[in-house]
């Protein structure tokens, strides 16, 4: 099931065993250093830069291609292929942000805070095909500045942090819990 509200992680079979094995997100007593490099927020900034730069670049290329002595269908084909290649590049880049974000969460902190969204196409509670609208709750983890590790917010110890927990949808596997919903993202190597 691609994303569901489902049970709380503590109610999922395998939670106690995963906790005993040290496989759950660890939220240390004191703020940890920035252990995951590059940070999720730095990668997200790169992703946004790529997206914005790509749109501008496609506009420039479109202006150049339209001035070439090509028939209309050829121009449309070239621009369509370039736009498709750009879309594929974006869809391949965003999951890298997600992997870094999950790695940070497993260490007990985050540098990237989302209100809604996801990193992997087709995961999360969908309202329309391809629309990722998973809500996030980061109160249970340290929020650190991505540049210097400065504490932006300490964790609420009464709230379980987002991260990888035993899956209610695939027994024996770990799944990403956003703090509100199960995203449907199954851990790599699980």
Image (cartoon, grey):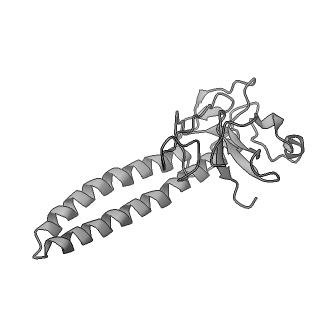
Q: Is residue 24 left or right of residue 103?
A: right
Residue shown at 70%/34% (left/top)?
161
Q: Nearer the viewer, residue 21 or 30?
A: 21
Residue shown at 15%/62% (left/top)?
63
Count the marks: how many?
0
Residue 85 coordinates in the image, percent (x, y): 37, 66
Q: Is residue 34 above or below residue 81?
A: above
Q: Is residue 29 left or right of residue 162?
A: right
Residue shown at 73%/61% (left/top)?
189
Say which quadrant the C terminus sits in.
Answer: bottom right
Q: Is residue 56 left or right of residue 108?
A: left
Q: Nearer the viewer, residue 170 or 136?
A: 170
The answer to which quarter of the image holds residue 24 is: top right
Q: Is residue 54 left or right of residue 62?
A: right
Residue 18 coordinates in the image, percent (x, y): 85, 46
Q: Is residue 49 visible?
A: yes
Q: Nearer the viewer, residue 47 or 182?
A: 182
Residue 101 coordinates in the image, percent (x, y): 60, 46
Residue 159 coordinates in the image, percent (x, y): 72, 26
Q: Is residue 96 above or below residue 115?
A: below
Q: Is residue 35 visible?
A: no
């Amino acid at each position: 099931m691609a994303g569901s509200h489902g049970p709380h992680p503590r109610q999922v079979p395998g939670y106690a065993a995963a906790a005993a094995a040290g496989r759950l997100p660890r939220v240390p007593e004191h703020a940890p250093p920035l252990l995951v490099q590059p940070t999720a927020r730095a990668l997200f900034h790169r992703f946004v830069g790529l997206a914005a730069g790509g749109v501008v670049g496609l506009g420039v290329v479109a202006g150049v291609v339209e001035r070439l002595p090509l028939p209309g269908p050829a121009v449309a084909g070239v621009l369509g292929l370039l736009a498709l290649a750009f879309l594929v590049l974006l869809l391949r880049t965003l999951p890298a942000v997600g992997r870094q974000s999950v790695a940070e969460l497993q260490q007990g902190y985050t540098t990237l805070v989302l209100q809604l969204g996801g990193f992997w196409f087709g995961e999360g509670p969908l309202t329309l095909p391809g629309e990722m609208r998973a809500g996030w709750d980061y109160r249970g983890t340290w929020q650190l500045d991505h540049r210097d590790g400065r504490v932006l917010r300490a964790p609420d110890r009464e709230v379980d942090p987002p991260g990888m927990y035993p899956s209610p949808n695939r027994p024996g596997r770990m799944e990403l819990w956003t703090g509100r919903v199960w995203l449907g993202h199954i851990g790599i190597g699980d």
